[in-house]
Structure formats: C-alpha cells, structure tokens
Amino acid sequence: MNKEVSLTIDGQSISVPEGTTVLEAALDSGIYIPHLCYHPDLEPVGVCRVCMVEIGGRMTISCKTPVQDGMKVITDSPAINRVRKTAVELLLANYHRDCATCDKNSVCELQRVARYVGVDPEDLDHLRPPDSSKGIDTSNPFFDRDLDKCILCGICVRTCREITGVSVIDFINRGYKTTIGTFEDQPLKESPCGSCGECVVRCPVGALTPKEQEEPSREVLTTCSYCGCGCGIYLGVRGDRVVSARGDIDNPASLGRLCVKGRYGYGFVNSEDRLTKPLIKKNGEFEEVSWDEALEYTASRLSEHKGDETAVLSSAKCTNEENYIIQKFTRAVMETNNVDHCARL
C-alpha cells in the first residue's frame, strides 16, 4: 500500500496516496481544475494545457505532476486564468460554431471549461480562420465522426491504443492541418475499427456521437446476454423500451468496457417479433402456453429418446456454467456425445 502524502490545494490540507497526480488529488477532493485531454482510464499526456496550476511560484500542468509532501498548489489566479483562457480560445477558434444542434450540448466538457475560464465569443472573431469544413464521416453503422468538432485532445487515439490495443486511429498531417484519422485517412468503415465505441464514450466533445441515442428515464444494472463473459452493463430504459447501454466500471469481468454487441446490439429487446411466452405446436399451429406446461412437455418428449438419436446444441449467450450443465446433461442423462455449440457453426 502506497504511503500517504500531505499537501495543500488552495489552502485546503489533503492527504492522498503517493504517486497520485495533482489533478487527481484535486478532483478526488472535490476541487475542480479544468481539463480536456485527461481521462482517468488513460495515461496523462498534457497536450491541452488547460489544467495549469501554480506550485512554488511556477506554473505547470497538473495532470502529469506527482504530489509531494508539503506541496502548496494554487489552482486559480489571474496569471493561470490568462493561460487557460488563451488555450481554450485557440481551441474554440477552429471549433464547430453551432453548439445548439450538437448532440453533446450541455454535457460537452469544452463548454464547461469555456464557461469556467470566461471565454467571450467576441474575442474569438479575430482568431477564426477561413471556413474549412472537414466533413462528417458517417460510414460507421453505429456512430458518426465530425472532425469540425474535434479538439485534438487525443483521448480517442489513446483509448484505441491503451484500452482496445487496436490503434486504428492516430494524429495525421502536421501544423494547422493536423487531425485524427485512420491509415491513409480512409473512412472508419474501411478501417479495422471494431465499432466497440470505447472512443465514443470517452470523447469530451461532440466529435464522436452515436447515430441513435435517446436520454433514458432510468437505468437498470444487468449482465450482457451476448456471450458468457459476464460483462456488466447499465441498460437505459425509457417507458418500456431499452434506449441505451453503458459499461459497469465496477464489474470485475469487464471493468466498464464493452464490445460492439454489448454497446449497440440491444435493439432486439424492443423487437415486435420477440417471443415473450413459450409456444407449443398444437394441430399444426403454435399456441402460447405457460412455462410449467412448456417445461413438462419438453421433459416428456426428451424422455422418449436416448443415445445417438438425440443431439444437443448449446448457445454462446449462456454462461460457462450453464454450458457445462448442458454438456453434462447430454452425456449423463441423454447418454450421447452429440453436443455442440452455436459459436462453432
């Protein structure tokens, strides 16, 4: 266990584990330091320069500065605010200008930081370059990429490299033409992108947004049904419909991460064709029956057959324990080795 380090931030005495950064110490203590390129799941890089603080009379970025015993940190001063405001103004000068129509409006981290540092829209006019729209990449079936709203924080790049290990995207070009792109700047659909959406959920602005999204009225903690990994998800519910899914960061199997199926594949739940009651064919037609009747009927039919005249097909949506029981039942009860798994078909 790391030893505790004592320091003061804006006159408040706090203690945090050794190795904690100044930004982490402040945020964990309820002290807001504006930031854009920092994300708790990723290694800090310090590219946005918005998290500047003053330590010992010198300004430094807080996201990469480890705490030390007796350290005195100042997070707000006229000099600090000038640096932050200039950095944010330069970002906004090249940014998409109509926030009212953006999917991230009111939950955009850039909006929050701009309000905090006091950016005046009139001050941006002399910084704005000629309009040079980069367009929107809509090729991905699950989310859109709008480079006019990108602030080059690099969170998506680091997410793809550090969390998914795929490295589909990176910084391309140089100078004012720098942007985020795939190999040879191909559309996402033409790249090896697996559409997991990890970059989308971490994007602090409106550069990456789901194609279909509704605000849920409540969330339900459950387990993803697509495979046996046991990933934890929060399903967003609106009325009687599932409208969103996000990872449960406290789940030991997934740590909040999801694949494309877990994040975007919940639409089947709302399907009108989905069976909600068991069916038994009677007189050539399927009829709805109770679960007790269905189970009794299934057991009676299975008891009529044994050995190689039977075969059992398991499901990838079952847990490992359930699949073990199925194969045990097939071999010990049905007395056959004719058991297979849909994931192999």
Image (cartoon, rainbow, N blue to C red):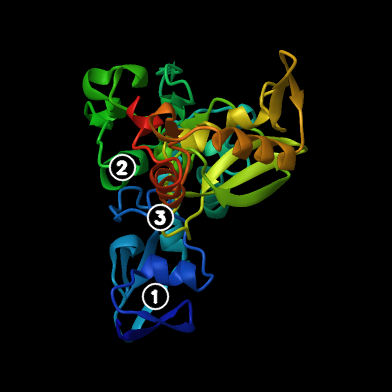
Q: Mark 1 sits on what residue?
A: 73
Give amino acid for label 2: Thr
Quarter in which the C terminus is drawn: top left
Query: Closer to the camera: disc 2 or disc 1?
Result: 2
The answer for how far apart the CA atoms under marks 2 and 3 are is 15 Å
Q: Position of residue 86 (x, y in %)?
A: 41, 47
Is residue 284 visible in this depiction of the protein? yes
Pointer 2 local density, CA inside 10 Å: few below 14, some 14–19, many at least 20: some
Query: Closer to the camera: disc 2 or disc 3?
Result: 3
Query: Closer to the camera: disc 1 or disc 3?
Result: 3
Is residue 285 found left or right of 213 in the rendered image?
right
Residue sticking out furthest to the top: 284
Q: Mark 2 sits on what residue?
A: 164
Tell me where residue 25 sits by quadrant: bottom left
Q: Secondary structure at mark 2?
A: loop
Q: Which mark is residue 253?
A: 3
Give amino acid for label 1: Val
**Residue depicted at x 30% and y 56%:** 44
Eyeballing the image, is 265 above or below 154? above
Of labels 2 and 3, earlier in sequence is 2
Q: Position of residue 233 (x, y in %)?
A: 53, 48
Q: Secondary structure at mark 1?
A: strand
The answer for how far apart the CA atoms under marks 1 and 3 are is 38 Å
For the residue pair 276 and 272, the one nearer the viewer reads as 276
Pointer 1 local density, CA inside 10 Å: few below 14, some 14–19, many at least 20: many
Quarter in which the N terminus is drawn: bottom left
Of labels 1 and 3, earlier in sequence is 1
For the residue pair 331 and 222, the one nearer the viewer reads as 331
Give amino acid for label 3: Ala
For the residue pair 291 and 85, the one nearer the viewer reads as 291
